[in-house]
Amino acid sequence: MAKKSLKKRILTKIAFALTAATVVSTIVAYIYFSRIVREQKIHDEQIKLRQIVSQLDFMVEDIQNFTRSIAIDQTIQENLNKKTYKNEFDKTKRRFEVGKQLVFYNSLRNYIGVSMLKGTNGLYYSSRNLMGDVYFQEKFELEEIQEYEARDDMVFSNPYYSIESEISQSVICYKTVIRDMNSASEILGVLYLDIYLKYFTDQIANYAKDYENVYLTGNSANILYQKKIEEKESGYFSEHTESNRQNVEKVEKGYLIREDIIAAGWSVNTFLSNKYLWQQSKFVLDFFLLFFVISITLLLVMTSRILESMIHPITRLTKAMEQMEYGELRSDLSIHTGDEIELLYRRFREMLAEIQQYMEGKLEDEHQKKEMEFDIMLSQINPHYLYNVLNTVVYIAVAEKNKRIVEIVNALIHTLQETLKVGEKNIYITIEKEIELVECYLTIQRYRYPDVFQVEICCEEELKKCVIPKTCIQPIVENAILHGIIPGETNGVIRVRIREAEEKIQITVEDNGVGMDSDKIRKFMSGEALEERAEERKHIGITNIRDRIRFLYGEPYGIWIESRINEYTVVKVLLPIQGEGKKQ
């Protein structure tokens, strides 16, 4: 029963993992390939759209070239250059000649409805010769023509219905300036052509046979042609017809594809709905669903067979491991299967024994090593001998009434008595005692360097009974004097601040000395040792303080340095709050 239960659990987990992995991979693959199919479909539509745009560009260029041919016609040039006429008959005759030429040119292009010419000589000419000046005035009073005349950025006018009764379809106006062939700077008139809008929209309609949502936009994004734009999609066209939008733009219901007809200032647009793109890429989903079902079925069947042959010895080994208490590296249980499972179990037992032996030896070695390191750091001379010698110096100084020597030696004796106490119990000292050691050190240094530095020590009262590692302030103050103030050859100020910050003890030693270069600070912060000497005599420096704090406390405690050359150096030490001074 246990065998079946374990097999079921393992198979369930494996099935879940395989299913999840297969589902994820299938989804990722489907998304990837469906995106490729979608992008390819959009790209294909862009190509089709560019083809129709190229055709429309060609048609616009044909209109432009055709108007240039009209503009250089000799008959038209001669009549426009004519400023005076013999009589009214001569005037009418010349208007008829120009109109006849315009009729001729109209017959060459079936997309031209009416052509007109407004000369700088004050005359109007038209392919409709019978039209009088009133006709032209009405023509130029049309709102679309007035807007076209007022704007220089329009290649064609907006669509309008011609005032000619025989023209029942919408037209657009195209104009070109006619210049004197003998003097290009002289303008003879302006040629206006009424172009059937159907000439362009027929091309769009032919393209739109396979699409439901196609439209052609002209000036000011007004729609010149549209095919079956549904109400729910019309909002997209009105919101996304600005001239500066992208050629392919993602909208809520699909994609808007746009190609500009540069020669006309128009654009052709089509809308590909998400539903349409989904239909185009649905075969990808069908393929991956089939792949998923077949793959997961085969994997589960194969996994079940493999588990059947492996589950029994694994179950015994699992039970043996479960009976072992966490942290207990001994086990009386044995497994004899005669195969790799037994070998695995034996190696596991041997590994546990080796780990236990190694951990015990490692802990003992580390304890002895650190104990010796502290003894060596804090005891490098024979204190008994020093005490006897210094007491003799005090006796002689008292006898000779030299108070300064007495004060210096007493300060030194007090310092040695505190710092040379070794052993695990003497690693820590109260902040109050540490400040006394700093004051004793400063007493000695003031005699050695009179009027060279000033020291300000400020400590929060409730922190004075807290304990910190011994000699972790005095070496920093010493470093500030010897390496910061003294090399500057000017009077300096050292400020020592001890306060609580974010439930930690923060010790800050700041001086206005020569500073420390950034390379040295970088080496220090990366864990390298600093070669610090005071008059060729090694001393317990800030490197030692850094290493002790790391050993005793670890992160986030430590020591940091900030400095600027010839301005200042700030050393900040963070320590945990310990002892009786501050309640935890």
Image: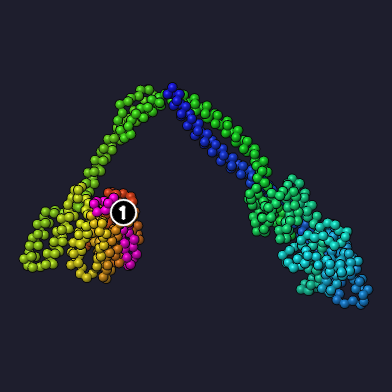
x 72%, y 54%: residue? 268
Pointer 1: what residue? Answer: 504
Query: Is 178 on the left-hand or right-hand side of 221?
Result: right
- Is residue 483 in view from this perspective? no
The x, y position of residue 292, in whole percent, is 57, 33
Q: Position of residue 496 (x, y in %)?
A: 27, 62
Between 252 and 42, the one nearer to me in the picture: 252
Residue at horizontal 88 percent and vertical 63 percent from the top: 103
User: Which of the 4 quarters of the picture holds residue 285?
Assistant: top right
**Extreme residue toward the left, this view:** 399
Q: Residue 524 lies in magenta, yes or no?
A: no
Is residue 564 magenta-colored?
A: yes
The magenta segment is: 560-584
On the rendered structure, is 228 left or right of 490?
right
266 or 365: nearer the eye? 266
Circle count? 1
Instruction: Kindly tell me whether residue 122 is visible in this rendering.
Output: yes
Q: Residue at x 33, y 50 (%)?
A: 555
Question: At 50% from the left edge and 31% from the top edge, which residue is drawn?
Answer: 15
Element at label 1: loop
Point out the residue furthest to the right here: 89
- Position of residue 484 relative to residue 41, above or below, is below
* The N terminus lies in quadrant: top left
On screen, residue 291 versus residue 395, left or right, reads right
Q: Quarter of the image holding residue 279?
A: top right
Give the camera-side residue of 360 and 11: 11
- Type of amino acid under label 1: Lys
